[in-house]
């Protein structure tokens, strides 16, 4: 069994990585420690790199077919980790999950029909439908401000905001930015509501393989027959194995009517043909070796989260990290600093020289929060927190 070393620093300069290359454009300065965009600073595991390298040795990159083993690998991975029996005909490639959301909006919704989202939530859930001319309806999560910050779905509000024009709900499962692993009962209740109201659920499950501390991801479509019949699931190995640039996403649609309508449109536009390297990377990731790397990576991420929690408790008690149940993203509750939106951003960017995701970009309920990516070396986290502690002390 290989042992992987996640403390090893990786120099990303010269790779064109988004995390560093757009700091000046997005934050107004380039001298920031970037803990924002949701990819990790861990090297893509060698078994994936080696698989890509072996294909690179055949220096002809023409048209290729989808390897038959691709969907077997995906189905077995999902079955073994999430106990969901996915049939091969339910699966297809898509060129990215946000792109998939945009495609689904255009295939299934008329110009005057609406999309429901549950803020605070991943901002393309709002931006993509709006950019395609659809109205977005807000069903904010209920925040419980007890000793441990928590969120629940607000079904009473969902009843109130839903009208006959609401035809799609985009679900973050596990939730981004709060890292919630939704309980089965919650997903079943949501499925029942959406099935009764003829609403298609787009379930973004890109963080499904990153459950922490014994939590278990539950695929939305697996919780009931109603869920299976009203849903489209999007997944990918990209977050787990740090291969977002390879674009290896897939869709799962159990309902034959939804599937025929969506997949025929993808086929007509040749959007279901994977790039050359996507199947290779996916098949290399979804193996026992990949699962061992995943386990070691998640253990390191758990330790990073604990490090952030302990540091904040000792040195920055006004900032309270919400412990995620999945993913490498930590939702920082900064409300006790009593800073407005611009003041909070100024603190992080210009005083601490850190680039995080501003909580307000995630919509209603994100005010006073920041999202921190802890998928990095612990020394980087320590430097970031020391900068933040010093900046807070100077308020």
Image (spheres, rainbow, N blue to C red):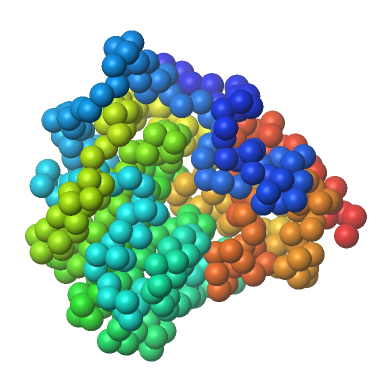
Q: Is residue 336 left or right of residue 218?
A: right
Assign the C terminus to one quadrant of the image: bottom right
Image quarter of residue 377: top right
Give the x, y percent position of residue 144.
Answer: 54, 72
* Residue at horizontal 23 percent and vertical 40 percent from the top: 273
* Residue at horizontal 71 percent and vertical 40 percent from the top: 33
- Would residue 374 be seen by someone viewing this image from the given angle? no
Q: Is residue 6 left or right of residue 296?
A: right
* Residue at horizontal 44 percent and vertical 36 percent from the top: 245
Assign the N terminus to one quadrant of the image: top left
Give the x, y percent position of residue 42.
Answer: 53, 29
Query: Relative to 234, is 297 above or below?
Result: above
Image quarter of residue 307: top right
Front in this rendered view, residue 114 or 163? 114
Q: Is residue 269 left or right of residue 208?
A: left
Front in this rendered view, residue 2 or 146? 2
- Would residue 237 be seen by someone viewing this image from the given angle? yes
* Residue at horizontal 51 percent and vertical 52 percent from the top: 324
Query: Relative to 360, is 112 above or below?
Result: below
Give the x, y percent position of residue 187.
Answer: 30, 66
Give the x, y percent position of residue 127.
Answer: 47, 65
Front in this rendered view, residue 115 or 105? 105
Image quarter of residue 93: top left
**How many numbered discs sit on the rendered protein?**
0
Query: Relative to 340, is 358 above or below?
Result: above
């Amino acid at each position: 069994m290989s042992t992987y070393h996640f403390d090893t620093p990786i120099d990303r300069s010269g790779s064109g990585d988004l995390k560093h290359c757009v700091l000046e454009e997005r934050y107004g300065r380039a001298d920031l420690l970037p803990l924002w965009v949701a990819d990790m600073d861990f090297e893509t595991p060698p078994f994936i790199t080696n698989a890509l390298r072996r294909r690179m040795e055949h220096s002809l990159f023409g048209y290729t077919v989808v390897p038959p083993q691709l969907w077997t690998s995906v189905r077995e991975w999902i079955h073994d980790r999430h106990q969901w029996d996915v049939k091969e005909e339910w699966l297809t490639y898509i060129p990215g999950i946000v792109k998939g959301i945009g495609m689904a909006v255009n295939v299934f919704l008329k110009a005057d029909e609406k999309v429901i989202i549950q803020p605070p939530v991943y901002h393309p859930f709002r931006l993509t439908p709006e950019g395609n001319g659809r109205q977005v309806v807000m069903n904010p999560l209920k925040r419980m401000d007890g000793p441990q910050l928590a969120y629940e779905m607000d079904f009473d509000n969902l009843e109130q905001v839903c009208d006959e024009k609401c035809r799609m709900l985009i679900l973050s499962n596990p939730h981004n930015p709060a890292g919630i692993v939704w309980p089965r009962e919650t997903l079943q209740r949501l499925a029942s509501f959406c099935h009764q109201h003829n609403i298609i659920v787009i379930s973004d499950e890109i963080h499904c393989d990153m459950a922490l501390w014994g939590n278990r991801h539950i695929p939305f479509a697996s919780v009931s027959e109603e869920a299976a019949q009203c849903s489209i699931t999007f997944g990918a190995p990209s977050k787990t194995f740090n291969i977002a640039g390879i674009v290896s996403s897939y869709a799962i649609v159990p309902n034959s009517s939804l599937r025929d309508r969506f997949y025929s449109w993808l086929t007509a536009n040749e959007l279901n043909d994977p790039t050359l390297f996507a199947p290779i990377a996916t098949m290399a990731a979804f193996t026992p070796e990949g699962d061992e790397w995943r386990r070691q990576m998640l253990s390191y991420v758990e330790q990073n989260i604990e490090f952030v929690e302990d540091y904040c408790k000792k040195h920055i008690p006004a900032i309270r990290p919400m412990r995620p149940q999945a993913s490498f993203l930590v939702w920082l509750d900064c409300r006790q600093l009593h800073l407005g939106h611009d003041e909070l951003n100024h603190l992080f960017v210009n005083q601490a020289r850190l680039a995080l995701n501003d909580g307000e970009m995630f919509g209603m309920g994100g005010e006073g929060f920041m999202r921190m990516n802890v998928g990095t070396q612990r020394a980087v986290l320590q430097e970031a927190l020391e900068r933040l502690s010093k900046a807070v002390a100077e308020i």
